[in-house]
Amino acid sequence: MKMCGADVPYSLQYHPSVKSEDIPELDKRTKERIKRAIETRLAVAPQDYGVPLRKTLKGYWKLRVGDYRIVFKIQAKKILILGILHRKDVYNIVEKHRA
């Protein structure tokens, strides 16, 4: 049995604007929910919990946490987080952050 966080197969990398713009805008409760989702779902099994995006964002994934979306890209054993935003804003802004 694996302990939560004890065996994290994926490393996390954040787009610079996620830490400087997206995260500071969130309230404390939402930050905790998102942090827990990243640690227990995204870093462990992103394909199991995420949903692949289509059309112009093909190759990217999203993880839903309440009204917020975490948009990410899987690169081997690295997760690149491109945005953590409210569902109404996330896709327009993530278009600009694509790598």
Image (cartoon, rainbow, N blue to C red):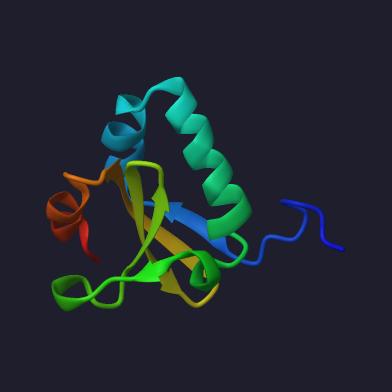
Residue at image coords 53%, 50% = 38
The quadrant of the rendering that contains the C terminus is bottom left
Up/down of 32 relative to 86, above or below: above
Residue 28 shown left or right of residue 21 in the figure: right
Quick one: quadrant of the N terminus?
bottom right
Residue 90 in the image: x percent, y percent? Answer: 21, 49
> Which residue does the image show at 50% across and 77% down from the upper left?
76
- Image location of residue 55, percent across then percent down: 16, 77
**Horizontal relation, residue 28 to residue 85: left or right:** right
From the top left corner, tell me how far across and down residue 23 is, in percent: 36, 33
Residue at the (58%, 65%) spot, across then down: 10
Q: Where is 26 relative to 12, above or below?
A: above
Q: In the displayed orientation, state which residue is furthest to the right.
A: 1
Q: Closest to the observer: 47 or 95? A: 47
Q: Nearer the viewer, residue 25 or 51?
A: 51
* Residue at 48 percent of width and 40 percent of height: 34
